[in-house]
Image (cartoon, rainbow, N blue to C red):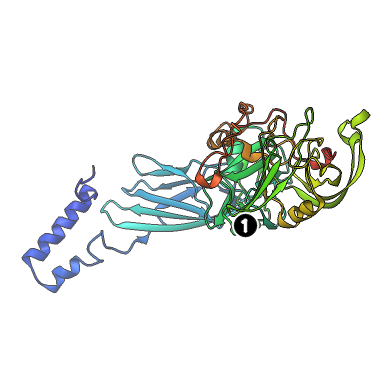
Amino acid sequence: MTDIRTGDSPRRARLASRCALLIAISPLAVGLAACTSGGNPLAATPYDAAAKVVYGTAAGGKADPNKPLKVSVKDDGSRITDVTATDTAGRYVRGQLSADGKRWQSTAPLAAGAHYTVRVSTEDSDGHPGRKVLSFDTTTTGGAGLHVTFGPDAGTYGVGQPITATLSKPVHDRAARAAVEANLRVSSVPNASQGSWYWVDDKTLHYRPQTYWPTHATITVRSTLSGVRVQDKLYGGDDKPLTLHTGDRIEAITDAGTDQMTFKDDGKVVKTMPITTGKPGFDTRNGIKVVLEKEQFVQMRSETVGIGGSDAYDLPVYWATRVTWSGEYVHAAPWSEGSQGSANVSHGCTGMSTENAEWFFEHVREGDIVRVINSHGPTMTPFDNGFGDWNLGWAQWKQGSALSGGGGVTGAPKQEQPDPDQSPSPDQGQDPGQLDAGSRPTTDPARLQPQAL
């Protein structure tokens, strides 16, 4: 039983009372000495409890990470009051103490190939505190292990750039996915809004904040999977961290209804340009896209996207900024200048004058935002044609997490069409849209390289 007022055990309370009484009846030095650290168990320096503490797991000098860590005390009236176990990476081991304080056992797997320090606090039958510090190593695991590669490459990107994590082996089970996800750490300075991973498929995760990244931020991505048991016989390995930076918040709003592009830098309108987008039957996709890459020259051939007959083309195109892997660009289209600002005549790309296309090309970088509104085309899907991640609302995005949602093991969320009159601003805490994927996702650009003019 515990004393409600002090939180001390009854025997500690009795010792403290006797000590207080001794001071009250005698001012002698001997009485005072009895209440110093040598006489008051509450203030005493912990004694070495090595003779009382027993722990198991080790075999051949190293512990099996598949077996729990067990700590106990000898049956001489002593009990365990606390156990703290950490590895050199700073990871704590969860555990449970028995009701009688005699035994403690880990409730989470140990990491493989790790060095652990275990601090055990005890109390003897008279209430004197003891302390024992133990250390041990766990055995390494065979095989290549599970590795993660972060993307994109280190550098400076727009505030719409998602983080990617590609696993070396597929992970199917939700509990295993949760183990992986919990050890993929993302931070930014200045701080971003809350963020989350989304399981695109068994080997691919994307990370984005609820709103766009802060401008001029430093983003750090790292894995703490090393030695962590993901699933039976599969442990995480050592992997390289990634550091990214963001620039200004660049947004290009492409209005297919007015045939105008509004270019914003940190919310300020810098330039408005006449454009043309996809004609009926080739309507440009609505939604939020991000710049994937820039190519000063591309030879665009209609056969790569299955267009023939009277609509066939084979033309040199300059100042081409790619926004989908299937071939949607913002590019120079001098042949359509007579229609730019008044009609949509392209095969899906956003065309503009050569002068404006060069200006746009020079003022955007990968990860910058290109948002199409008021088109009659379908909505940009999140994952199978570039980075359409922002086309999922935040509640939908969290469902792709194994820690806060289904983790991608229960299917994709339902797609919803956004209201084109609504212009969600992620910096204002609004969802950038309520859209979703309609097909099995893939992020392999080698499979999707055609061009649409």
Residue 70 visible to an observer of this rendering = yes
- The residue at which mark 1 appears reads as 248
* Residue 342 image offset from top left, x and y in percent: 74, 38
* Residue 173 image offset from top left, x and y in percent: 63, 32
In this rendering, the count of numbered labels is 1
Residue displayed at 65% across by 42% down: 206
Q: Is residue 438 left or right of residue 16?
A: right
Q: Nearer the viewer, residue 67 or 427?
A: 427
Residue 171 to residue 353: above or below: above
Picture quarter with the C terminus: top right
* Residue 438 image offset from top left, x and y in percent: 69, 28
Q: Quadrant of residue 168?
A: top right
- In the rendered image, the residue lying farthest to the bottom is 29
- In the rendered image, the residue lying farthest to the left is 25
Identified by mark 1, the residue type is Asp
Residue 161 to residue 402: above or below: below
For disc 1, the neighbor class at 10 Å (few under 14, some 14 to 19, many from 20) is some
Asked which secondary structure carries label 1, the reply is loop
Q: Nearer the viewer, residue 59 or 148?
A: 148
Q: Is residue 45 left or right of residue 179?
A: left
* Residue 102 image offset from top left, x and y in percent: 37, 44
Q: Quadrant of residue 261?
A: top right
Residue 161 visible to an observer of this rendering = no
Residue displayed at 24% across by 48% down: 9
Residue 281 to residue 210: above or below: above
